[in-house]
Image (cartoon, rainbow, N blue to C red):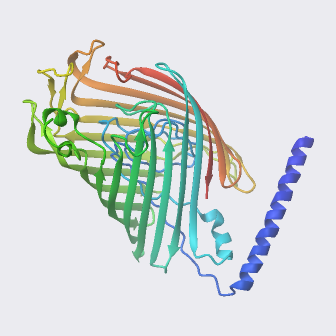
C-alpha cells in the first residue's frame, strides 16, 4: 500500500511539473505570436488498403490488443511477430514467393489527444506519430528455437490549407525479424526492412464528396541468411506509383470509397536462373528484370452504420519482361498476366455493453471473412534433379482460392483517468488456401493426383495494458498450426506447429 501511495505521489508530481512547463510554453508562445489561432479541420481517416499482396494487403487495425503472428501474404507484409493494438490477425493468402504487396498509404491518423496542445503553440500542422517495438521467442516443431524482433515507426502530419484543401505526408520504417511465416516459400530466418513514403492532397469538393490524390514510394530489402548483405537480396523491390480515391457519404450512415491506383514494381537484383541456364552464352541482362511488373488496382470500400465494413478489389499485374513458359521447355511470346479478385467484410459486435459512462466492462468481437481468387497464365516446370530432360509441366501453377476467417474477442477491464483502455483479448484465425492445378507431393517428392492445399490455424490470447493515453504494453502467446497434403519437406516445412511468446510496446498519437 505504501508503495502504491508513493507511486501515486510521484505520478502527481511529474504531472504537476509537466503542467508548469506546458503553461510556461503557452504563455511564451502567446507573447511571441498573439495572432489568432487558425482553426483546422479534423483529419479524415485514410483507409489502409488490403493488398494483393503477396501480402495482401494491409488492413485497418481495430482498437484492441494486437497479437503476434506472421503477416502473410505480401512480400512486404510478412512480419514475424506483429504486435500492436488489434486483436485481429491479418493473414493473407499464400502465393508464389516472388509476389509482392501493394504499397501502403498512411494509416488512420489518431491525433485528437494532442491537437489542442499544438493549437496552443500556434502550430498549423496536426501531427501523427506511432512507434511499435516487439520482442518474441518462438519454438517451432521443426528446427531450433529462435528470438525475433519487430520494429516500426511512423511519422506524418496534416496541413490544412483552407476548409476545402489539405495536405497529408507520411513516412514509415519497418523491420521484421525471424519468425513463423504464413506464406509458402518464406523461410523462418528471413528478415526484411521497408521504407514507405506517401504524399496526399485532399479536396472537399462538396458536402458528402471528397477527392484524395496521392503519390507513393516504397522499397523493401530482404535477407534470408546471415551471410547476405542488405540491398542485395534476390527479391528486393521498389515501388513507384500514385492513385486517386473518391469518398462518398450517403445519408450520414454509409461511407463509400472508390480507389484507382497504379504502381510499378521493380526487382533490381532478380534474375531468371532457368533462362540463364538455357542461354549461357548471352548476356545476363536478358534474364534480369523478369519480375518487374505494372500493377493496376480497383477497390471499393464501404462502411455501414459505423459498425460494418466491406470491400471488393481487383488487382492486375502485367509483367514487363516475363514470358509464359511452354511445355516444350521454352518461353512463348506471351507475357505473364496475373489477376486477383479479393473481397471481405467485418462487423463490430457488442456482446456485453460497457459500464455507464465508461468503456470498462465492454465485451466485443469483430468477426471477419476474406476471400481471394488468383488467376495467372503462367505455368511451371518442376525438375526432379539438375539437368532433368523431362521435367514435370504444371499448367496454371499459381492459380489458387483462399479463405480467411477471424473472430477476435476483447474485454475492456479498466479505463485510465487520462484515457487509454486495458483489455484481455483472444484472436482465433483460420486461413485455407487451395491451388486449382498444382499437384501435391508425397514424402519422396513424387507428384500425386489431387491439387495442393494448405490450412493454417493461429490462436492468440493476451493482455493489453494502457500505460498512458498514448502508450500500451501487450503481453501475449500465439500458437500456429499448419497442415498440408504436401508431405515433401526437404527444403521448406509444410506441416508444423509453433509457439510464440511476445511482448510489445506501442506509442500512438
Q: Is residue 417 left or right of residue 313?
A: right
Q: Can you tell which quarter of the image residue 246 is in?
A: bottom left
Find residue 260 and report its horizontal and vertical position in percent.
30, 60
User: Which residue sits furthest bottom?
Assistant: 35
Please state which of residues 381 and 436 is positioned toward the viewer in this rendering.
381
- Report the residue that reaches farthest toward the top: 444
Residue drawn 32% across and 55% down? 299
Q: Position of residue 6 (x, y in %)?
A: 90, 47
| Residue 181 in view in this figure | yes
Say if 482 sits above or below 102 in the image: above
Q: Quadrant of the C terminus?
A: bottom right
Please tell me how many numbered marks the rendered image carries. Answer: 0
Residue sitting nearer the eye, 486 or 218:
218
Q: Is residue 47 visible?
A: no
Question: Picture coordinates of residue 243 (x, y %)?
Answer: 33, 63
What residue lies at 59% left-to-right and 40% top-to-bottom? 134
Quadrant of the drawing holding the N terminus: top right
- Residue 19 vs 161, above or below: the answer is above
Which quadrant would residue 502 be assigned to in this image?
top right
Q: Residue furthest right?
A: 2
Question: Which residue is at a point 41% across and 34% down the rendered structure image?
Answer: 224
Q: Is residue 28 left or right of residue 489?
A: right
Q: Position of residue 473 (x, y in %)?
A: 66, 43
Is residue 13 shown left or right of residue 359?
A: right
Give 312 or 314, whichever is nearer the viewer: 314
Nearest the eye: 71 or 40: 71
Amino acid at each position: 500500500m505504501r508503495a502504491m501511495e508513493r507511486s501515486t505521489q510521484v505520478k502527481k508530481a511529474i504531472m504537476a511539473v509537466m503542467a508548469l512547463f506546458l503553461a510556461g510554453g503557452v504563455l511564451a508562445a502567446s507573447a511571441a505570436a498573439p495572432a489568432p489561432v487558425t482553426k483546422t479541420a479534423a483529419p479524415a481517416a485514410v483507409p489502409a488498403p488490403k493488398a494483393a499482396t503477396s501480402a495482401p494487403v494491409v488492413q485497418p487495425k481495430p482498437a484492441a490488443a494486437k497479437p503476434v503472428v506472421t503477416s502473410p501474404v505480401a512480400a512486404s507484409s510478412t512480419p514475424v511477430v506483429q504486435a500492436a493494438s488489434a486483436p485481429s490477425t491479418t493473414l493473407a493468402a499464400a502465393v508464389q514467393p516472388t509476389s509482392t504487396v501493394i504499397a501502403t498509404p498512411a494509416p488512420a491518423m489518431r491525433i485528437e489527444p494532442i491537437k489542442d496542445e499544438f493549437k496552443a503553440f500556434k502550430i498549423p500542422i496536426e501531427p501523427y506519430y506511432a512507434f511499435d517495438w516487439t520482442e518474441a521467442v518462438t519454438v517451432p516443431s521443426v528446427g531450433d528455437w529462435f528470438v525475433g524482433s519487430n520494429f516500426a515507426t511512423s511519422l506524418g502530419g496534416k496541413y490544412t490549407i483552407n476548409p476545402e484543401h489539405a495536405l497529408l505526408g507520411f513516412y514509415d520504417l519497418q523491420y521484421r525479424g525471424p519468425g513463423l511465416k504464413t506464406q509458402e516459400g518464406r523461410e523462418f530466418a528471413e528478415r526484411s526492412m521497408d521504407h514507405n513514403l506517401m504524399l496526399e492532397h485532399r479536396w472537399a469538393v462538396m458536402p458528402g464528396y471528397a477527392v484524395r490524390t496521392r503519390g507513393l514510394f516504397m522499397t523493401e530489402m530482404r535477407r534470408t541468411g546471415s551471410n547476405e548483405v542488405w540491398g542485395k537480396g534476390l527479391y528486393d523491390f521498389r515501388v513507384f506509383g500514385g492513385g486517386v480515391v473518391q469518398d462518398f457519404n450517403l445519408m450520414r450512415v454509409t461511407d463509400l470509397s472508390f480507389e484507382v491506383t497504379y504502381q510499378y514494381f521493380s526487382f533490381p537484383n532478380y534474375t531468371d536462373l532457368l533462362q540463364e541456364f538455357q542461354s549461357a552464352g548471352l548476356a545476363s541482362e536478358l534474364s534480369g528484370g523478369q519480375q518487374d511488373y505494372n500493377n493496376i488496382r480497383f477497390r471499393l470500400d464501404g462502411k455501414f452504420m459505423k459498425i460494418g465494413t466491406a470491400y471488393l478489389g481487383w488487382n492486375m499485374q502485367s509483367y514487363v519482361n516475363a514470358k509464359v513458359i511452354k511445355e516444350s521447355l521454352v518461353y512463348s511470346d506471351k507475357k505473364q498476366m496475373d489477376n486477383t479478385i479479393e473481397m471481405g467484410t467485418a462487423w463490430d459486435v457488442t456482446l456485453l455493453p460497457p459500464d455507464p459512462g465508461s468503456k470498462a466492462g465492454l465485451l466485443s468481437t469483430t468477426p471477419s471473412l476474406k476471400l481471394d481468387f488468383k488467376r495467372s497464365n503462367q505455368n511451371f516446370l518442376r525438375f526432379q534433379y539438375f539437368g532433368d530432360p523431362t521435367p514435370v509441366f504444371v499448367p496454371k501453377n499459381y492459380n489458387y482460392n483462399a479463405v480467411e476467417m477471424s473472430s477476435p474477442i476483447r474485454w475492456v477491464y479498466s479505463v485510465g483517468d487520462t484515457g487509454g483502455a486495458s483489455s484481455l483479448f483472444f484472436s482465433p484465425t483460420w486461413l485455407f488456401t487451395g491451388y486449382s492445378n498444382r499437384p501435391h507431393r508425397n514424402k519422396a517428392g513424387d507428384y500425386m493426383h489431387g491439387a495442393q492445399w494448405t490450412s493454417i490455424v493461429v490462436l492468440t490470447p493476451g493482455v493489453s495494458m494502457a500505460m498512458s493515453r498514448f502508450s500500451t504494453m501487450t503481453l501475449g502467446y500465439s500458437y500456429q498450426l499448419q497442415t498440408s497434403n504436401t508431405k515433401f519437406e526437404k527444403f521448406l516445412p509444410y506441416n508444423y506447429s509453433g509457439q510464440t511468446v511476445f511482448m510489445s510496446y506501442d506509442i500512438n498519437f
